[in-house]
Amino acid sequence: MLKRFTYRQRLKYLPVGFVLALLLIYWLAIRETVKIKNDCSELIKQTKTAEDAPQQMRLIKTRLDELNNVMGSDTVKSDADPLLKFVSRLNSNNSNLVDFQPLHVFEHQNYQVETRIAVFEGTYVNLVKFLFDLEQKFLAGKVVSVKFQTETNFKTERKRLLMTLYVQSVKNVALNNDEASSPLKK
C-alpha cells in the first residue's frame, strides 16, 4: 500500500499521521493520567489548607462565643460595649450588624484612645439614618470615619451595601487615676 504513494505524497501525509498518532496515544493512555494528576494536586492543596482547620475553628468559635455573649439575647449585659448597647436600643432601623471588631485601646502620654470598628448592612437610606442617630445620640464616643462599600454575595449573586464605622473615645487616664484615689469622691 505504501508503494502506491510517491515520496512526496508520503512526506505530506507523515506529519498528519504523526499528529493523529499523538492524539490517539493521548486519548487512550495519557488523558486519564493527566486527569488523575490534576485531581491529586487539587487534593494536596485542600489538605494543606485543612491542616490548620482545627485552629481556625477554635478562633471562629471563640469569636462567635464573644458575639453571642454580647448579642445573644435581646437585653445586652451591663458590661457590654457601649456601641453594642446603643445598637441594641436602636433596633428599629433596618440595618443589620454584620461584624464587630474587638475593642482596640491605644495609650499615649496621659490619654487612652479606644477605637470600635463595626460593619453594618442595609440600604443607603437606612444606613445614613442610623449614622445620623449615632452621631446625635451616642455619647460614649464620636464617629471618626465611615466607609461605604458594595460587596457581591457569590452564592446569591446579589450586591449588598456595607457601612464600616470607626468610633473613637478619648479618655484622660491621669484624671481618672486622680478621681479614683481622691477620698472626696467616695
Image: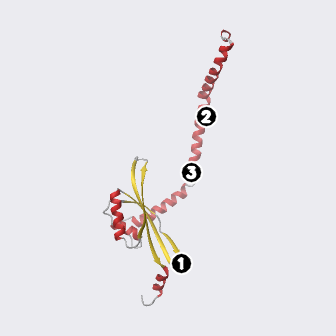
User: Above or below — where is 180 with respect to 53?
Assistant: below
Of the image marks 2 and 1, the number of the one nearer the N terminus = 2
User: Above or below — where is 122 with respect to 78?
Assistant: above
Label 1: state its secondary structure: loop
| Residue 16 image position (x, y, % from top left) | 62, 21
State the residue at coordinates (60%, 27%).
28
Q: Left or right: where does residue 150 sit relative to residue 14? A: left
Name the quadrant of the C terminus. bottom left
Q: Quadrant of residue 71?
A: bottom left
Label 3: few (<14), some or many (≥20) within 10 Å? few
Q: Left or right: where does residue 65 sit relative to residue 19? A: left
Camera-nearest label, 3 or 1: 1
Q: Which mark is residue 49?
A: 3
The answer to whether residue 44 shows anywhere in this view is: yes
The residue type indicated by label 1 comes to Gln
**Mark 1 highlights which residue?**
109
Q: Which mark is residue 118?
A: none
Q: Quadrant of residue 99?
A: bottom left
Camera-nearest label, 2 or 1: 1
Of the image marks 3 and 1, the number of the one nearer the N terminus = 3
| Residue 83 image position (x, y, % from top left) | 40, 68
The residue type indicated by label 3 comes to Thr
| Residue 1 image position (x, y, % from top left) | 65, 10
Number of marks drawn: 3
User: 144 or 113, which lies in front?
Assistant: 144
Label 2: few (<14), some or many (≥20) within 10 Å? few
**Mark 2 highlights which residue?**
33
User: Which color scheme is applied?
Assistant: secondary structure
